[in-house]
Amino acid sequence: MAGKKKRGPSPEIKVRLTRCRRQIKSCGASALLLYNHVDCFYLTGFTGDESAVLVTAKDVHIISDGRFEGEVAKEVPWATTWMRRGMLNDEIVKACKSLKIKNLAIQPGHCSVGDHAELKGKLKGVRLIPAPPIVASMRIIKSASELAALRKAIKIAEDAFRATRQTIRIGQTETEMAARLEYEMKRRGASAPAFSTICAEGANGAIPHAVPGTRKVRKGSSILFDWGARVGRYNSDLTRMVFFGSIPQKIEEIYGVVLKAQIAATKAIRPGVRMCDVDAVARKIVGDAGFGERFTHGLGHGLGLEVHEGPSLSWRSKEKLAPGMVVTVEPGIYLPRIGGVRIEDDVLVTKTGHRVLTSFNKTLRSAVI
Ligand code: GLY
Ligand code: MN
């Protein structure tokens, strides 16, 4: 059932919708259908998931269900709502027919083959237009309010890590340390960890996305922490090493290389520089030290409403950095059966260069507890 409500969107949402509508028009469509709930939130402020948003030239339509009645009323009272009793796609079809939409832009990255077939079958005479990533590309450049949210998420993550470091003792498992860090973030205001906290002791540090397990802290342990806080829906993402008492010799060697690469790549960040060229700065330092094969992932990624979003700071991307982007810089060296080192900061591209948003100490000495 459709119901129309009043009270307009915030100025920031209005600007986003205007920019979005311009792009809907330029891909030859009269409306855009969004299934991706992060994009839906960015464009409307509606937090419900398993819903859809339909943006037309004049209106925004939220297609949702009874579970999100409260959110719809509170967050998007200005939108037209379609509260389904049946299936989501059937309600979308109903809305499109009632609005007489003829050219519908869809998100190819988020509309499944099944959804596409269903819409195509039920919306006879409607052209489904695979749109470029309209909302994802808007999300790459952060506004002042988004930056404020990111800074909060970073502060909470860093304060929580400081507190957690003080509680590390011989005999603790990776799982216990990761749980402690997540607890410390939540008690400081995080709604959730930004992702499942990585805590990898010893040889587990050689697995870039190690899952915390039963390995225990011992004298001379090298422990990799990769963590972040989700605060007000924005995420932080950091990686730091902790050395318990002393540093294994090989790990000390690669720490120096990774830190040098991380600092040099960060220095290269400024508007107009290609992503692949920043990646190359770090990769050359790691390669020259003889560990090129063991730096097995890209240098970094965009950060915001999602932990991994555009832009991709990697050798694959010829795109250029621009003011307002926030990226992680996280080179790593992973030595199977020995261990690994990764150091990660969150960096804002400014008009003239960059600003490192994270501030947790990363010198070798400071990593020893
Ligand atoms: N912090 C996890 C990652 O960037 O993949
Ligand atoms: Mn990361």
Image: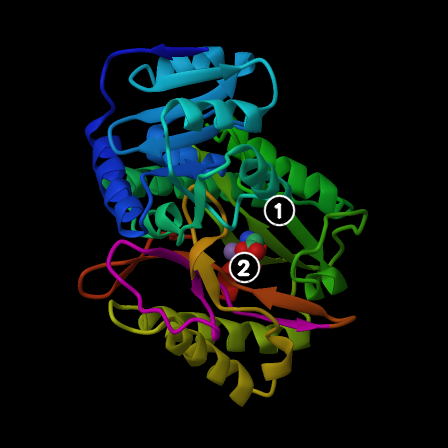
Q: Please give the name of the residue rendered at 44% of the width and 80% of the height, measured from the top-left corner.
A: 280
Q: Which quadrant of the view contains residue 29? A: top left
Q: Please give the name of the residue rendered at 53% of the width and 81% of the height, measured from the top-left corner.
A: 286
* In this rendering, position of residue 253 left or right of residue 273: right
Q: Please give the name of the residue rendered at 81% of the width and 47% of the height, measured from the top-left corner.
A: 214
Q: Is residue 366 magenta?
A: no
For marks 1 and 2, the one nearer the N-term is 1
Graded by Cα atoms within 10 Å as few (under 14), some (14 to 19) or many (20 or more), the crowding at tag 1 reads few
The label shown at residue 113 is 1
Image spot of residue 220 (x, y percent)? 71, 62
Q: Amino acid at mark 1?
A: Val
Image spot of residue 184 (x, y percent)? 55, 33
* CB-based contact (under 8 Å), mark 1 and mark 2: no
Image spot of residue 332 (x, y percent)? 57, 69
Q: Quadrant of ligand 1?
A: bottom right
Q: Which residues are magenta?
A: 312-335
Is 269 above or below relative to 117? below
Q: Is residue 327 magenta?
A: yes
Q: Is residue 232 visible?
A: no
Q: Is mark 2 within 8 Å of ligand 1?
A: no
Graded by Cα atoms within 10 Å as few (under 14), some (14 to 19) or many (20 or more), the crowding at tag 2 reads some
Which residue corresponds to mark 2?
Answer: 367
Of residues 241 and 193, the one nearer the viewer is 193
Quarter in which the C terminus is drawn: bottom right
Is 333 above or below relative to 232? below
Is 212 above or below relative to 323? above
* In this rendering, position of residue 130 left or right of residue 184: left
